[in-house]
Image (spheres, coloured by chain):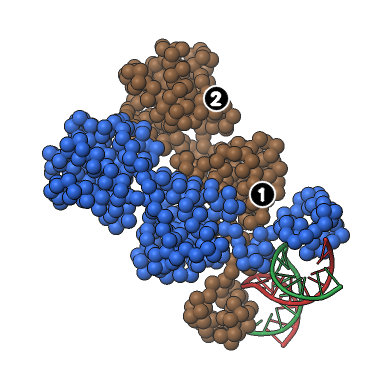
Chain colours: A brown, B blue, C red, D green
Amino acid sequence: MADVAREAGVSLMTVSRVINEKGDVSDDTRQRVLTVVERMDYRPSGIARSLATHRTGTIGLVVPDISNPFFADVARGVADAAYLENYSVFLCSSDEEPERELEFVASLEEKRVDGLIVCSSRLPRQDLTVALTRHTNVVLINRRANDLGAGAVLADDEAGARMIVEHFVRRGHKNIALLAGPSASYSGKARLSGYRSVLETSGIAWQPDLVRHCAPTADGGAEAAEALLTERPDITALFCYNDLVAVGALRTCTSRSLEVPARIAIAGFDDIAIAALVNPPLTTCRVPRYDIGVQANRLLLNQINSEPCNGCETILPVEFVVRASAP
Amino acid sequence: MADVAREAGVSLMTVSRVINEKGDVSDDTRQRVLTVVERMDYRPSGIARSLATHRTGTIGLVVPDISNPFFADVARGVADAAYLENYSVFLCSSDEEPERELEFVASLEEKRVDGLIVCSSRLPRQDLTVALTRHTNVVLINRRANDLGAGAVLADDEAGARMIVEHFVRRGHKNIALLAGPSASYSGKARLSGYRSVLETSGIAWQPDLVRHCAPTADGGAEAAEALLTERPDITALFCYNDLVAVGALRTCTSRSLEVPARIAIAGFDDIAIAALVNPPLTTCRVPRYDIGVQANRLLLNQINSEPCNGCETILPVEFVVRASAP
DNA sequence: CTGTTAGCGCATTCAG
DNA sequence: CTGAATGCGCTAACAG
């Protein structure tokens, strides 16, 4: 910058003003400075600027696993939205390890990020609190924490679950099973709760052995479906925690020669790309993953610009999608 | 930091030494400082440190689309490897827009990243050169640029293509078609080249109408397969640019009642998760995406630590995977 | 083993 | 409209 100032015959301050388009500078000198900047390929140091202004123009994004299509889509939403606002995004893929998640949060503090988006943290409540109080601007995805003063973006998982189970009920199913995924997660609980509420209002008895928790993967779904169908061969409809679980269940049905949907109807959740591509294509519930990312970013930038948002929440609607696996 | 120094009754320098575990400090004072650091919840400012040291401990990762499972896996490799080396990663998802890619490269320069990993850039050669010469440490993925002094990590796409087509030939196929994907990309060219070379060595005549370029998506594959099979119903084997294209081709075959693999054998490429989950599961070639990310990071860190690497390349082997779509 | 003196490259006062 | 002085929080070289 000093070089530019000298070459242009002005002070450092004037160069700074021109670059930041701030204060009044005569068109004449502005042009002169810009020319020199161009000629010398000068790029201001964001580091030095950050040190002076206490703002970095960066945010942190913590996800359990960036290779999981769900989080990859969320990340894309965050990244795109951040780009439009001239923010840069630190990607932190915690590999589901709480310990690593904590290290990320600490590291992001050293990097002096302006804010933080934490996606589906496995962190126990206690650790979350400690980690987040050191950051002023935080948005949580798929997790509530109003009392921490953090914003939250959630999908309406419960409503989605209700739509799916109601669909089954309308089709006359009585023995509707649930592969419920992880019991600890927000979405796991919400989807289970939706399932229960429809059974209740439909006057269908709650049968505990129709519900099984499982890992949120295709293998987890396949195993759980195997066990479930062995124990209760009278099941005619199967609501799966997510599409991967449903794909696994589909595999199990195929290997047991249970025709889908003729003999057993199957529904997933999320509507990731694979849902439409398997055979038969999955009935499911579309979760606006990209939008979740965009909204999380929006909430965060609002906080950064100190527009108040104490524990404000954004709940995004989901969309029921009927396909051949449960017509 | 000044506060810590005062509280501990030492100079700034000593605090700095303790924090960076550098120089000799007596156990006594070290403990005293650490205690104060703990008590005051002090965290050094990476920004200030970067300004003083000219190193940021950050790298940039530019990908066309983070929601594409291929790049998501690469990103995970980069992120995991970077984490192990205490580096932070800026995620830049360019949405396939060359213009945005350029802005990212510029922005990463302002952020003073220590290095840059660029994945499958759509940038014309000219722009790439300009953008990259401003960064000293660069690694390219799926693209060569030895003369730029950038490192490169590539998968052995040509060998993979050869394995697949050889497999078809061994099974007695003569009319082997290729849905070749984008003609401009490195991997598109390499896979086409592998296809041609096997035909040649096998004495099978090259038939231009058996090759069709298409978008690297399921829809792209479905359309292209439709056209291809209409024109040449005598095709018995179909090698697809990647798994998504193969899934599309599969869909087309199903809708035309062409049994796979009895009537027509199909193979994909990459071995993304979906390949094993469709029906029938896809024969394909596994590209070590995660490893590509890890290796790219390794090459980059080598450059950063000024171990010479002028245009060095790492070519990763691929693995042939036989499944039911082409047994 | 420890402290002192200088910046790192910029933005923010305040004066001209 | 422009410039000079000062500090952001830390580290690199030297001195003690």
Residue A243 x/y as whole percent: 43, 31
The answer to the question of whether label 2 and label 1 lie on touching residues, with beta carbons closer than 8 A, is no
Closer to the observer: label 2 or label 1?
Answer: 1
Residue placed most toward the observer, B176 or A136: B176
SS of the residue at dot 2?
A: helix
Q: Amino acid at mark 2?
A: Ser
* Vertical arrangement, residue A172 with respect to residue A140, above or below: above
Q: Amino acid at mark 1?
A: Ala
Residue at mark 2: chain: A
SS of the residue at dot 1?
A: helix
* Vertical arrangement, residue A324 with respect to residue A34, above or below: above
For the point 24% across and 43% down, which residue is it?
B165
| Residue A256 visible somewhere in the drawing | yes
| Residue A164 visible somewhere in the drawing | no
Residue A259 x/y as whole percent: 32, 19
For the point 50% across and 76% down, which residue is it?
A41
Badge 2: residue crowd in 10 Å (few <14, some 14–19, many ≥20)? some
Q: Which residue is mark 2?
A: A193
Residue placed most toward the observer, B20 or B108: B20
Dot placed on the residue nearer the N-terminal end, 2 or 1: 1
Residue B74 x/y as whole percent: 45, 48
Question: Where does the C terminus of chain B fall, quadrant-wise?
Answer: top left
The dot on residue A106 is 1
- Are dots 2 and 1 on a single chain? yes
* Vertical arrangement, residue B69 with respect to residue A44, above or below: above
For the point 69% across and 59% down, which residue is it?
B45
Question: Where does the N terminus of chain B fall, quadrant-wise?
Answer: bottom right
Q: How many marks?
A: 2
Query: Hey, which quadrant is residue B263 in on the image?
Result: top left
